[in-house]
Image (cartoon, rainbow, N blue to C red):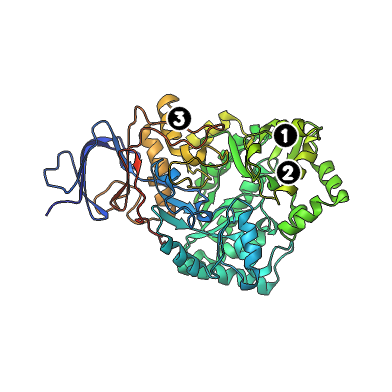
Amino acid sequence: MAWSLLIRNGTVVDGSGAPGSAADVAVEGDRIVAIEPRLTGEARRTIDAAGLAVAPGFIDIHSHSDLFYLGCPAAESKLRQGVTTEVVGMCSFSPAPVHPARKAVTAAWIGEIGSRLAVEWETFGQYLDRLRRAGPSINIVHFVGHGALRLAALGPENRPPSPHEQGQMERLLDEALEAGAFGFSTGLVYPPSAYAVTAELVALARSMAHRRGLYFSHIRGEAATLEAAIDEAIRIGEGAGVPVQIAHIKASGRENWTKMDAALRKVSDARARGVDVHADAYPYAAGSTKMANLLPAWVHDGGNARLLERLGDGAARRRLIEEGAAGGEGWRSVNGSLGWGDIMIATCSQRELEGLRLSELAERRGRPAAETMLDLLVEEAGQVAMVVFSQAEENVVKALAHPHVMIGSDSIGLSAGPGPHPGKPHPRMYGTFPRVLGHYARERRLFSVETAVNKMTGMPAAKLRLKNRGLVRAGYAADLTLFEPTTVRDEATYTDPHRHPTGIPYVIVNGQVVVDSGAMKPLPVGRILAP
């Protein structure tokens, strides 16, 4: 009987970190069935991979595509990077669970980072069923967001949960884990997750220890509080007996750049004493989030409607500017001190503003930059995404090179079809994985291509305890990415982000070719993976 697919003449980079080797790879159905230097069987289709590396499909350990799958199930900007599995439900955000009386509140909260979901579900299981019906082209690993748990159990208020509400969150978490969630995530700079004290999080984490759930944390500050915030994340995992993943590890704000060595050392030290802790990083010195996150937590208390009320109140606005002003030249926030030229408008409804720095917009409008920022948030009902240039390149290099840091884009899979596409989103949405392979592995020689692939495949698969994924092995899922080691590169830039990479001609998901000779073939072949 002929195999369904035979990949000949490639160099297998198997995801383990071991040196690449010349071998053919045979696929039958959705599984790899043979790997040998020269396979002689017949196949319904043969791909000549001469000059190509044959790697496991990349696993994006930190993504936010769950907020967009229902509108863009193809996730083209991820698949064309070689990503075959995305980890979502990050930074406390997930579309479920939802309290039946708070569907509008939840939809507005999700919408704060650009999504426009019609919330048609209540339980996490119902949401996953809806996601399956959408027919994604990519595999999905889902976490439940702590913010969603809090909204469902006690709403958007800044207060501790009652014992009953704490129990309710734990019950909702257990239901999500039973439905297929891999653990829960926090976003401890994003309300309402930011309102939690450590004890609340330890109790939640401990409640999932029997299921071996993973605690995934956007920590409580990546600037002045970086070291204490990493200590807290490790303490939660260690105290609860669950593994920990520190999201997009970084030192944000120029005054905090010297903290990066200590931050990474904390990960190494915790591992040395037996804590199962890793981190992830993206290969850029700029991040991206919603502009409203530059405002302190008290402004967010009660949700987006209350935030907009405060921005329209003269006294509250004066207090905000007094707290945030950084000598008139920038803004102080949980992200550290930022110059107005460090903050770029990525997406908003006023398309002509996208790509402008706040310094440029303030000059156009003849208004102080702080007032301009608050005006824009009011005009856009809080729905402004930004790119923020807050990191040092040398720290990006340190994070990527660390042996226990894997690669995550912290972005979404969007832009199905040829475009044109709106906005100036962060180029990591199109370029994260080829940038690691091209810029950092090949050009800067930060690590070998085998190490780069391990950080994108075998390492995250092991952390997630994914069975039979993340390596090129017989019996494993046929998730494969074929790339040209000598030419692969990211093409997306901050000013021209909607550009797919070059040098990744084939991507295979569960045995089906979804990127074929560089062309996207959106097929509903992705799966919602379970722990």
- Mark 1 or mark 3, which has the lower sequence index? 1
Q: Amino acid at mark 1?
A: Leu
Nearest the eye: 51 or 372: 372
Q: Residues within 10 Å of mark 3 (few under 14, many from 20)?
A: many
* Residue underneath mark 2: 376
* Residue underneath mark 1: 361
Nearest the eye: 176 or 357: 357
* Location of residue 433 (image quadrant): top left
Q: Amino acid at mark 3?
A: Tyr
State the image coordinates of residue 332 (x, y, percent, origin top left).
Answer: 75, 39
Q: Distance from label 1 to label 3 (Cα)? A: 34 Å
State the image coordinates of residue 428 (x, y, percent, origin top left).
Answer: 51, 39
* Location of residue 102 (image quadrant): bottom right
Q: Do the residues under discs 2 and 3 have CB atoms within 8 angstroms? A: no
Instruction: Give me the disc on residue 174.
Output: none
State the image coordinates of residue 82 (x, y, percent, origin top left).
Answer: 38, 42
Q: In the structure shown, which secondary structural element does the residue marked by tag 1 occupy? A: helix
* Residue underneath mark 3: 440
Q: Residues within 10 Å of mark 2 (few under 14, many from 20)?
A: some
State the image coordinates of residue 414 (x, y, percent, origin top left).
Answer: 48, 47
* Location of residue 327 (image quadrant): top right
356 over 377 or under it: above or below: above
